[in-house]
Image (cartoon, grey):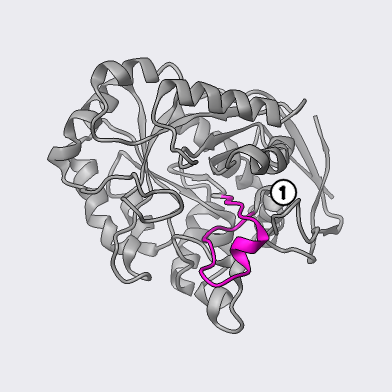
Amino acid sequence: MTHTLISPLDMHLHLRDEAMLKVVAPLSAHSFVGGMIMPNVVPPITTIEAVIAYKERIMSAIGNNVFEPLMTLFFRSDYTREFLEKAALHVKALKLYPSGITTNSEGGVASMDIEVLRSVLEAMSDLGLILCVHGETNGFVMDREKEFGSIYESLASAFPKLKIVMEHITTKESVALLDRYENLYATITLHHLLITLDDVAGGMLQPHLFCKPIAKRYEDRDALLHVSLKAHPKVMFGSDSAPHPIHKKECCGCAAGVFTAPIALQALVELFDKHNALANLQAFVSNTAQTIYGYKAPYKEVVLEKTPFVVTHSYGDVVPMFANETLAWSIKYVV
């Protein structure tokens, strides 16, 4: 049995930089035709020159693979309209991080006061730039995304022409917002479709499943599954694949991030097949994203087959999700 995906896209991807970039970029570029590249490298991507230089490093790292990096800027409240007009030639979106909320986000937004953000968000709305948001407060870890919901509502109401992507949503409350505001969209990860907090910390602690936002309850996972499996028109795949070296995962003070890039499509096909929803996977991993972003992806054909795939223990110094386990599907070939 085989299943073909056309031009799969990863709309939330961390490629890091330098040595790590050279390890992980070819893994995404092999099976995906493009990815929305997150800007929270060190230092963060805040200038047009930095965007261009980072894209060049990515293109160098991916080798002969057909892959288009969709670049983003690290959101700052002091960007001018003139700057954003020039940036719009090079980026698809700006990524807003509340300060200190996740990896390399210390330079993020300190205040979510709409009046502080207004000039940038109005300019983005006029220019057709999309706002991507890591939506968490600094509250109790299981409630952070839920608490951020009121901020999403304020942003959606104040800037109705601005497309806002709620990144890597994890709660049933975030899912409910999709049908309440025309300009709210979302990415959903592979790992949040599969795991709950029980898988992370219910028994022995599993550092390679620890991420931010943290995995939530069963009812939250079920809500994510429901909209993904039925190809909700405002939901798209974004892996949030976030590589960290082993010594930063298997340690005290474990870094947050699940590395799924090399196994994402195999695991997604297995999941959708299990739920008799393979017909909707094409929309989830490509078509919906192209519609939301008004983007025409390059052509790439990925053929998967229902034969066992044994996941390697590590790629370089990075351990993937399902390391040493066997998935039911594998990639047969890529055109």
Residue at 53 percent across and 61 percent down: it is 255
Residue 107 placement (x, y as % from top left): 34, 44
- Secondary structure of the residue carrying numbered label 1: helix
Query: Considering only vertical position in the picture, is 33 above or below 229?
Result: above
Q: Is residue 26 left or right of residue 82?
A: right
Specify the amino acid type for callout 1.
Pro
Residue 134 placement (x, y as % from top left): 38, 49
Which is the main secondary structure of the residues drawn in magenta? Answer: loop
Density class for disc 1 (Cα within 10 Å; few <14, some 14-19, many ≥20) is: many
Query: Considering only vertical position in the picture, is 164 above or below 313?
Result: above
- Highlighted magenta segment, given as a residue range: 241-259
Query: How many marks can you see?
Result: 1
Query: Considering only vertical position in the picture, is 165 above or below 247?
Result: above
Residue 154 placement (x, y as % from top left): 19, 47
Q: Is residue 217 left or right of residue 96?
A: right
Residue at 59 percent across and 78 percent down: it is 205
Q: Nearer the viewer, residue 184 or 88?
A: 88
Q: Nearer the viewer, residue 109 or 335?
A: 109
User: Which residue is tagged 1?
Assistant: 262
Residue 310 placement: quadrant: bottom right
Q: Nearer the viewer, residue 192 or 219?
A: 192
Q: Quick check: is 256 in the magenta stretch?
A: yes
Q: Which residue of the protein is positioned furthest toward the bottom in this rendering?
A: 203
Residue 139 placement (x, y as % from top left): 28, 67
Residue at 72 percent across and 39 percent down: it is 31
Residue at 83 percent across and 54 percent down: it is 306
Query: In the rendered image, which quarter contains the C terminus?
Result: top right
Q: Quick check: is 204 in the magenta stretch?
A: no
Q: Which residue of the protein is positioned furthest toward the left in this rendering?
A: 115
